[in-house]
Amino acid sequence: MPAVKKTNRRAQILQALAGMLETNAGQRITTAKLAEKVGVSEAALYRHFPSKARMFEGLIEFIEETLFTRINKIVNEEKDSAARCQLILHLILGFAEKNPGITRILNGDALMGEQDRLRARIAKLYERLETQMKQVLRERKLREGKTLSAEEEVIANLMICYVDGRINLYIRSGFTRKPTEQFSEQWQIFKQLFI
């Protein structure tokens, strides 16, 4: 039973950290403030996570697992390349919209002043997303026998830059400009690349 309690406390700590990232924009989150929010001592925090960096890594792992599990499901279930791209972009934007605090990790804002390896891991996450998009676009040629109006690398990069821009706009607006706002209309522009 103690293992279940430990897991729940870990999740509670990560949820509190994500909540503080949302409500304390631009402020550095200390372990003292986090411990107070969770209702435990700082020592108790360190029993679950050896460092604050490990707490951020826990949130990054949540991001990676959530996004890539769902992306794999999209790739396995949807065969049309344009629909795959649309669903993947909407997934990323929807995830950001539902998790504003975690979105500050995605754009690196919450990681300023933290360890370089955390920012490197987020950079790697975006590289993986771009690679996934390139793979979907390359499969279009193989599976559907159709080419694109530009190189796969260029389109994949454009799509990931779009997602990154929408996430940054969401944060700059104080979480008022939703990432999925106008997505349907904007997708119509992207869709032209598949004609």
Image: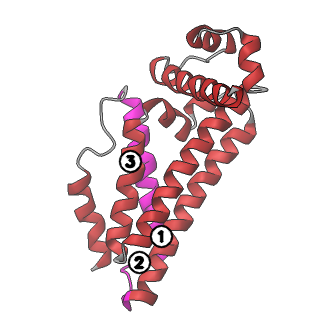
Question: Secondary structure beneath disc 1?
Answer: helix
For the point 48% across and 36% down, the residue is: 103
Counting other residues with Cα less than 10 Å from the Cα at mark 3, is it few (<14), some (14-19), or many (20 or more)? many
Residue type at the position of mark 2: Ala
Q: In the drawing, does residue 9 fall left or right of residue 161?
A: right
Question: Secondary structure beneath disc 2?
Answer: loop
Q: In the drawing, does residue 164 fall left or right of residue 115?
A: left
Please state which of the two labelled residues, at mark 2 or mark 3, is closer to the viewer.
3
Q: Which mark is residue 150?
A: 2
* Residue assigned mark 3: 93
Q: Which mark is residue 154?
A: 1
Q: Position of residue 157 (x, y in %)?
A: 49, 63
Q: Position of residue 132 (x, y in %)?
A: 52, 66
Question: Secondary structure beneath disc 3?
Answer: helix
Q: Which mark is residue 61?
A: none
Q: Position of residue 65 (x, y in %)?
A: 56, 50
Q: Which residues are magenta?
A: 144-173
- Judging from the image, the colouring scheme is secondary structure
